Image (cartoon, rainbow, N blue to C red):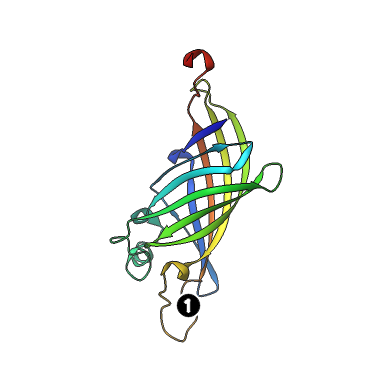
Amino acid sequence: MSERYQLDPAHTVIGFKAKHLAVTTVRGSFQKFDGWVAGDRSNPASLTGEVTVDIASLTTNNEQRDGHLKSGDFFEAEGHPQAVYRPARAEQTGTDTFKVYGDLTIRGVTKELVLDVTLADEMDHPFQPGGKIVSLEATGSLNRKDFGLNWDGLAGTIPLASNEIKLEIDTELVSTAQPTEAATA
């Protein structure tokens, strides 16, 4: 049976980290996003969905750095205001672990992104009879240059930002009550 879940923005963190000058780790996150996933649990290959991230909501807790990341040197937020991830299928790798394959689009460039996903917890929704809450943790990495985020600072020096960007996502997904047989009869 196919199920559909919505990201709960109040209980989701879409984060990333990169090395600064190959020494220090800088962490950031996106504050505005929306998304859903759907599929049949007995058939992980049926996974589909869409997660849209507002690039202008990026924060690393440093206003100057955030402005630079949103500029044409990196995300070009004005011309490309959103990044979009479209999961296309999953494969189960353990009892509660999956590899999720999908397409990530940043700055108009689309590349496959594989996420390692763990089903952390699940429960019946306490305020929506028939609904569920699912907690997922996901990690992955990408090369920023694959998406045209090419700025390296001063030529001939160590790049100010590492090419490898690590993703860390913690999310709560909420289903809505599924119609019962009596309600559809």
Position of 77 compared to 106: left or right? left
Horizontally, is 116 left or right of 143 in the view?
A: right
- Residue 144 lies left or right of residue 98; in this view the side is left
Q: Count the marks: how many?
A: 1
Give x and y (percent) for residue 34.
Answer: 40, 43
Left or right of residue 143: residue 106: left
Q: What residue type is labelled 1?
A: Pro
User: At 52% across and 26% down in the image, what residue appears?
Assistant: 131
Q: Which residue lies furthest to the bottom in this view?
A: 156
* Residue at image coords 35%, 71%: 73
Q: Nearer the viewer, residue 137 or 36?
A: 36
Q: Position of residue 110 (x, y in %)?
A: 44, 61
Instruction: Tell me the element at label 1.
Output: loop
Quarter occupied by the N terminus: top right
Q: Position of residue 144 (x, y in %)?
A: 47, 67
**Which residue lies most toward the front here?**
185
Q: Position of residue 62 (x, y in %)?
A: 39, 62
| Residue most extreme to the left | 78
Residue 70 in sight: yes
Extreme residue in the right direction: 95
Q: With respect to residue 119, does 131 lie above or below?
A: above
Q: Mark 1 points at which residue?
A: 159
Circle 1 crowding by C-alpha within 10 Å: few under 14, some 14–19, many from 20 = some
Residue name at image x 50 percent, y 58 percent: 16
Asked if residue 60 can be seen in this view, the reply is no
